[in-house]
Image (cartoon, rainbow, N blue to C red):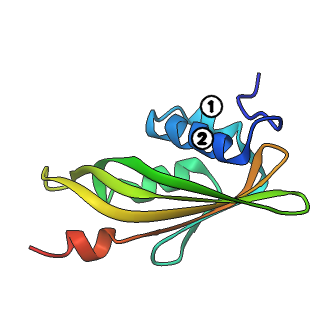
Amino acid sequence: MSEANPAQSASDTVKKFLNTMEARNLDGAREYLAPGFTMTFPGDAVFSTLEELIGWSKDRYQSVGKTYERFDECPTDGGAIVYCYGWLHGVGLDGKPFEKIRFIDRFTVEGGKFLDQKVWNDMAEVRGKG
């Protein structure tokens, strides 16, 4: 049974997906993805599977989590665009913790599924210092 629910708000769907991803429940997270889904991360890194994303992130940090500041939902003809704002925290490859790194995620949501996700954050700028 899919956890994606077209009857719930698009923002709630994004929150559930992000929590599912943070728990590394890839099977559960896949339930939220529409056919042809793509993710674009800083540096124009584009992925079409969650496994590609996980593989890419292994060279960036040991773990990462999100603290949410707010969600903005913009209705569209077929669903909504959801912007999620907040802060990243986690552990770098060097074992040092990091926190308070800004991020914005933008999701296109239709029928309780994600068509795409675009991610912006200050990870490179903050982690490159010191």
Marks 1 and 2 sit apart, C-alpha to C-alpha, by 8 Å
Q: Nearer the viewer, mark 1 or mark 2?
A: 2
Q: Secondary structure at mark 1?
A: helix
Q: Which residue is mark 2?
A: 17
Q: Residue 29, located in which quarter of the rendered image?
A: top right
Question: x, y percentage for residue 21?
Answer: 51, 40
- Residues at circles 1 and 2 in contact by the CB criterion of under 8 Å: no
Question: x, y percentage for residue 106?
Answer: 61, 63
Residue at the left extreme? 130
Q: Look at label 1 and name its amino acid.
A: Gly
Task: Report whether 127 appears left or right of 123.
Answer: left
Task: Report whether 29 appears left or right of 42.
Answer: right
Q: Residue at x 36, y 65 (%)?
A: 102
Q: Which residue is mark 1?
A: 28
Q: Residue 128, located in which quarter of the rendered image?
A: bottom left
Q: Residue at x 60, y 41 (%)?
A: 17
Q: Quadrant location of the N terminus?
A: top right
